[in-house]
Amino acid sequence: MQPSSETFPPPRSGIRVRRLSEHIGAEIENIDLSRPISSAQFADINTLLVRHSVLVFRGQDLPPAMHVDFASRFGRLVGHIVKRFSVDDYPEVTYISNVRNDKGEMIGADRAGMIWHSDMSYLPRPMLGSMLYGVECPPEGADTEFASMFAAHDALPDSMRALLAGAKGVHDYAWHYATYLSHRKPLTDEEKAQAPPVSHPALRTHPESGRKAIYVSEGLTRTLDGMEEAEGRRLVVEASEFATQPQFVYRHKWRSGDLVFWDNRSTMHRATEFDNRYRRLMRRTTVEGDIPA
Ligand code: SIN
């Protein structure tokens, strides 16, 4: 599909919207997030998030305090389990970055989210949404891909749908960390204790639209509940690979000043590779959601 400005119904607050792909993503073209947003703008942004799953706001100047103000409109903010990745004075804002401080330590989560996942699905109340803001973005690479779990759900083959319909995924941060983040300092026992494995339905119903979405991911869902570990894992990977085929994906190419707001209830995302001689400095807030059902 060609990107177009068609959305239905049109926003009432006067914000302009341009769709970015057939199933997922829209750009909001005329809003300045450093100023307080009105109730009408808030209502439109929320409606558009539920409809398009990923919203892009380009050209923003968003210091941490304003980032927090905007994100808090949508719910309670939850900081990263690893506290040293937080922005000074803003525990609810996390650096995603390859930048080091004067002591040579990483200031943020390095190589975060490079395997498909939905943010913090390992918590009993995972995230409604995430807002990632580009402070410094490499000139090439480091794109973020987003896949529509609505569109993937609607296209599920009957056999996979039947299998996932009654299943629960086991979401496990300590397993994820040990498997994919071995370049970092290991999690402490205290950090592990904050996120014991939890189970969530493999197919969930979006609390606002009632649409069904796939809710297992290669990156954070270790296996399926009550199944032999390796067989459950095989099915998780199969479902995740099905759900992230190119026809369900929008790929965001970052520019400094971009804020991308995505709905974790209806998407998976992953960061992509880049040349590590470039600095990448991103700030992220995450908004708590409901218990998946
Ligand atoms: C994330 O997984 O939240 C980070 C994605 C990115 O850095 O592109």
Image (cartoon, grey):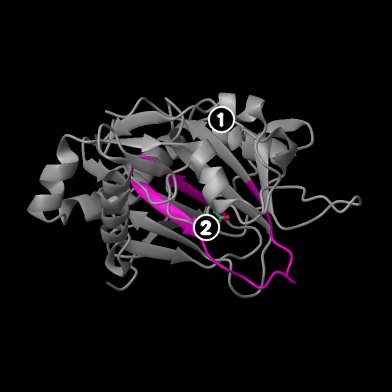
Labelled pair 2, 1 in contact (Cβ < 8 Å): no
For residue 101, side relative to residue 138 (left or right): right
Residue 200 locus on image (x, y percent): 32, 31
Q: Secondary structure at mark 2?
A: loop
Dividing the picture into quadrants, the one containing residue 167 is top left
For residue 185, side relative to residue 59 (left or right): right
User: Which residue is at a point 67% across and 32% down the rendered structure image?
Assistant: 188
Tell me, yes or no, if residue 38 can be seen here: no
Residue 127 locus on image (x, y percent): 45, 34
In the depicted structure, whether residue 245 falls above or below residue 68: below
Q: CA distance from mark 2 to mark 1?
A: 26 Å
Residue wearing tag 2: 114
Q: Secondary structure at mark 1?
A: helix
Q: Nearer the viewer, residue 122 or 263?
A: 122
Residue range of the region highlighted in magenta in the rendering: 259-283
User: Which residue is at a point 66% across and 36% down the rendered structure image?
Assistant: 82
Quarter of the image that includes the N terminus:
bottom left
View extreme (right): residue: 102
Specify the label residue 72 is tagged with. Answer: 1
Residue type at numbered disc 2: Met
Residue 241 locus on image (x, y percent): 31, 60
For residue 191, side relative to residue 263 (left or right): right
Q: Nearer the viewer, residue 113 or 261?
A: 113
In the depicted structure, whether residue 218 falls above or below residue 39: below
Tell me, yes or no, if residue 183 can be seen here: yes
Magenta stretch: includes residue 272: yes
Q: Nearer the viewer, residue 12 or 27?
A: 27
Q: How many marks?
A: 2
Dividing the picture into quadrants, the one containing residue 35 is top right
Confirm if mark 2 falls within 8 A of ligand 1: yes
Specify the label residue 175 is tagged with. Answer: none
- Tell me the mark number nearer the camera, choosing from 2 and 1: 2
